[in-house]
Image (tube, grey):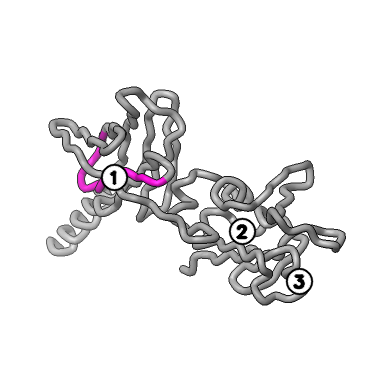
Amino acid sequence: MNRILLILVFLLSGSALMAQGLTGTVLKKGKPKKGIVVWLKKADKTVTTDKEGRFAFASVEANDTLQIAASGKQDAMVPVNGLQEVTVSLNDKDFSVKEVDAERTLPYVQVTAPKGGVNHELIMRSGFRSVSEVLKNCVSGIIVSADMTGSSIRIRGINSINSSNEPLFVVDGVAMSGTDIDAIVPVETVESIEVLKDGGGYGVRGANGVIEITTIKH
């Protein structure tokens, strides 16, 4: 009986630790910075700082890492460990992490984008909430326009003689055309996106270019 009670106490204690929340503030050159994307990597969750530079996660694990987009190519990486409250100050060449009774300065991590597309890490750190937003803002050579029926996507430099200039979407190897990609593929499930201007061997179907999307496999 005592052994069972000890096991239950252990499990409850572990659950309590996993359920621990984390709040923080992001400063840029000493001032609160709004709109900074903070990614909890293992949990694969993102939040954006408010006008006071604040962010919060209701539940974090001790072995997770905060990844904060300091610039287009630099991130601040902060191991969670036992953090409950943290202030991250972004400077030009490095960043500092201030906890309750300690402060340390760390170097940025350089972020590189794959040629011709984006990967899951870049998608999450961007903070964009749809595939079309990611394509418009993170992939060169893409034109995205929106109307009442959804988003219209074109690959710059391709003008087809066909009635449609929409590229061919290929999701996990399945070709799709004339579809609203945002309604089919949630952005948080995307592992990578690659743009093929030459049609990628899809023949006539790829005349307007091809956008290959690979989703995360669980």
Q: Could you tell me residue 94's position as x and y percent?
A: 26, 38
The quarter of the displayed image where residue 98 is located:
top left
In the drawing, what numbered circle is on residue 205? 3
Instruction: Kindly check if marks 2 and 3 are in contact, taking CB atoms under 8 A apart as contact.
Output: no
Amino acid type, mark 1: Tyr
* Residue receiving disc 1: 108
Q: Secondary structure at mark 3?
A: helix
Of the 4 image quadrants, the one containing the N terminus is bottom left
Q: Earlier in the sequence, mark 1 or mark 3?
A: 1
Position of 188 with respect to 179 (left or right) is left
- Stretch in magenta: 73-86
Q: Earlier in the sequence, mark 2 or mark 3?
A: 2
Whole-Å distance between the Cαs marked 1 and 3?
43 Å
Report the residue at 16% width, 34% height from top. Answer: 103
Assess disc 3: are there few (<14), some (14-19) or many (≥20) residues with their C-alpha within 10 Å of its C-alpha: some
Report the residue at 60% width, 62% height from top. Answer: 195
Query: In the picture shown, does residue 59 fall above or below 121?
Result: above
Whole-Å distance between the Cαs marked 1 and 2?
32 Å
Assess disc 1: are there few (<14), some (14-19) or many (≥20) residues with their C-alpha within 10 Å of its C-alpha: many
In the drawing, what numbered circle is on residue 185? 2
Report the residue at 17% width, 58% height from top. Answer: 5
Q: Secondary structure at mark 2?
A: loop
Amino acid type, mark 2: Val
Q: Can residue 76 be found in the magenta stretch?
A: yes
Q: Earlier in the sequence, mark 1 or mark 2?
A: 1
Position of 3 with respect to 162 (left or right) is left
Q: Could you tell me residue 34's position as x and y percent?
A: 44, 28
Q: Could you tell me residue 77's position as x and y percent?
A: 29, 46
Q: Can residue 123 be found in the magenta stretch?
A: no
Front residue of 46 and 195: 195
